[in-house]
Image: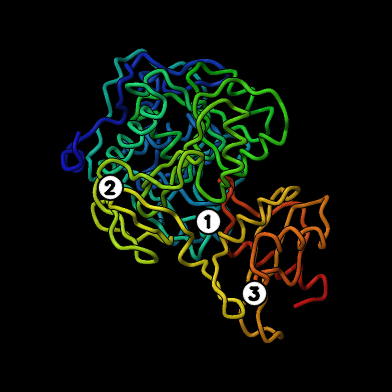
Amino acid sequence: MNASTALEAALPLLAGHASLDEPLAWRAGQPLSRRGFLQDARALAPSLPQGGPVLPMTADRYNFALALGAAVARGQAALMPPNHTPDMVRRLQTLFPSAYVLGDAGQPQLALPTLAYPGSAPAAGDPAPMIMVAASHEVAQVLTSGSTGEPMPHGKRWGQLVVNIAAEARRISETLGRADLRGVTIVGTVPAHHMYGFESTVLIAMLGGAAFASERPFFARDIARVLASVPRPRVLVTTPLHLKTLLDAGITLPQVDLVVSATAPLSPQLAARAEAALAAPLMEIYGCTEAGQVATRLTTQAPEWRTFDGLVLSGDGEQSWVSGGHVPEPTRLADILEVLEPTRFRLLGRSNDLINVAGKRSSLAHLNHHLNSIEGVQDGAFWLPPEGRTEAVVRLVAIVVAPDLDRQALLAALRERVDAAFLPRRILHVDSLPRDPTGKLPSGRLAELATRLLAESGHD
């Protein structure tokens, strides 16, 4: 289906090459059919309140998809914020006054009208006709992560998502050496309500013909257990942070056929280590909330990224734009790109993390890459204090999870990797960084942590 057709038609809720009697999901090793999903969604839809959007509060990927399907059948959308903090909930109430929660038992109570998911009674035996969705219907309101500022909502239209996922399905199939994704099972360590997890674990099954594991494992042994519970070929959709934790555990893992990872910060060393341990290729996906998925690369094979079918780049450097395919209007990318040709580029860093210290320029992404490549650093990030502090030249602060490395060892390792101007004035040891479930580190959280730690240590 071409982009113009998909953006004008009424399109099915489930697509791909799988039949309705094949699995959409696996839960505890048991298949949940695509036909049963349609029955569940049709049964749930009439019980949803008027208005919307619905905020799914669930750790179960099938239940998330069910909330989306029922809401769409009701003419509503799913609400996908980066977190559920009180401040975020207040923002949601302002932006979406008719929003309500559909939640699992035991989920935190939010200051929004709340319904419970129905029990796990068998679906009715009706034929479950396909749910059709207008291509122009905004089926999701996705809020940016806040990693670079204030979260903002972005409506996602069904037709654009259909084109988006068709391109991703072709790219994954190509990498697996398969004609399509029928019979492929996705195991995701990432939440369904973040854009990456939404596209690459939920929609890739609903629209691409794969199936997903309903569980979202985090700890290494849980990831291994869920992988073992589903049939091959298996695709592990994860983040660099989760991948590093998995590899550091040193446990035996079931066979994986492909690893899909979010982009930052994934070093070539970690990618090579993952491929060796999992005996599978690793493919990175690059994208953003505003444009969705944009490109992929096989990290250990080449530094260049290749855009999805139909997407083209224009501009260069800090002024790079993507358009075509599922991006009907040119959208600026918040990164520094070296555009080699309209469909190939190198990623150089984020345009808003360029820093100038003592007259020298670098990017925080570049510095963080080198910090995290030091043996013994489990996680780490640089922070540049705001101007106007006591010192004449503002100097960087490094916050690290490195229990076996002291300040001198860290500085010695950094001197071998970065210019002396970017050596941190302070190194703060912590047990963990305040990353979100996809491994992103919101700038506000990092600034709050650094400011508090400096104050506690008697430094400003």
Spot occupied by residue 337 in the image (x, y as percentages of width and height): 40, 59
300 versus 338 height, above or below: above
At 39% across and 66% down in the image, what residue appears?
318
Spot occupied by residue 96 in the image (x, y as percentages of width and height): 40, 56
Query: Furthest residue to the front?
Result: 416
How far separated are the C-alphas under marks 1 and 3? 29 Å
Q: Quadrant of residue 400?
A: bottom right
Element type where label 2 sits in the image: loop
- Which kind of residue does numbered mark 1 sit on? Val
Element type where label 1 sits in the image: helix
How far separated are the C-alphas under marks 2 and 1? 35 Å
- Quarter of the picture containing the N terminus is top left
Q: For mark 2, what is the residue?
A: 311
- Which kind of residue does numbered mark 2 sit on? Leu
Q: Quadrant of residue 247?
A: top right
The image's mark for residue 89 is 1
The image's mark for residue 385 is 3
